[in-house]
Image: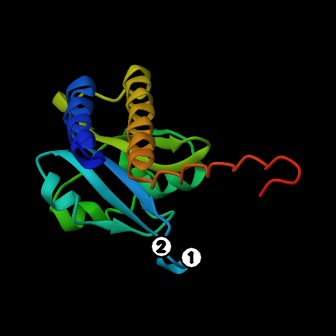
Amino acid sequence: PDAREVLNTLTPLACALTNSEGSAVALLDPGAKPDEARIYFLAAAGVKKEAVTKVSLKPGEGVVGWVISKGESVLIQDVSRDTRFSGKVDQFADYATRSLAVAPVRVGSRIVGAVEVVNKRFGETFTADDMTILKGLAQLAGIVLEIARAVAAPAPAPPRPVKPAAPDGAL
């Protein structure tokens, strides 16, 4: 399975473990030039998952962009009171995010994306335990991406055999 397939099993797990309406994994694509960088939602679960995976953000845009740029996790109980929330995904997906929790995804020391869960079910609020679960899933996503990149990377060329030196006077 490729990274997308594995991450598409991680997102419903995030929903189930945190009792959330939706979840997504967003990755930063640095682009060929700095102004071409974008954040893409590679995997999603929940009611609007197809729409979510068609949205892209600019680096730093929205809560996900903030988490990727700062490398810090965030838990927001009411997005209407947080200036980092952009609403772009909501507009595109015709959805209403009320609360969310987001954790950065790291590969080695680099932040490459984020895992998010949205809208705790049954009027509940996200807890520190939810954030602990989300951080663990973000670590797992990082491992999946690291393995996927290692498998996709071309294998290094085998070393060339060293020809033994000829004895003195021999050709």
- Using the numbered discs, state the Cα–Cα distance from disc 2 to disc 1 in whole angstroms: 7 Å
Viewed as shown, does residue 147 lie left or right of 97?
Answer: right
Residue 140 vertical position relative to residue 51 in the rendered view, above or below? above
Question: Label 1 near label 2: C-beta < 8 Å?
Answer: yes
Q: Nearer the viewer, residue 124 or 11?
A: 11
**Which residue is found at the position 20% from the left and 27% from the top?**
16
**Which residue is found at the position 27% from the left and 26% from the top?**
18
**Mark 1 element type:** helix
Residue ID for mark 2: 31
| Tag 2: amino acid | Gly
Using a 10 Å C-alpha cutoff, classify the residue at mark 2 as few (fewer than 14 neighbours), some (14 to 19) or many (20 or more): few
**Which residue is found at the position 56% from the left and 42% from the top?**
72
Residue ID for mark 1: 34
Residue 39 vertical position relative to residue 140 in the rendered view, above or below? below
* Residue 60 can be seen, yes or no: yes
Residue 77, image x and y in percent?
A: 37, 38
* Residue 80 can be seen, yes or no: no
**Mark 2 element type:** loop
Residue 158, image x and y in percent?
A: 54, 49
Quadrant location of the C terminus?
A: bottom right
Residue 162, image x and y in percent?
A: 69, 49
Quadrant location of the N terminus?
A: top left
Using a 10 Å C-alpha cutoff, classify the residue at mark 1 as few (fewer than 14 neighbours), some (14 to 19) or many (20 or more): few
Picture disc at residue 117: none
Q: Nearer the viewer, residue 85 or 92?
A: 92
| Tag 1: amino acid | Pro
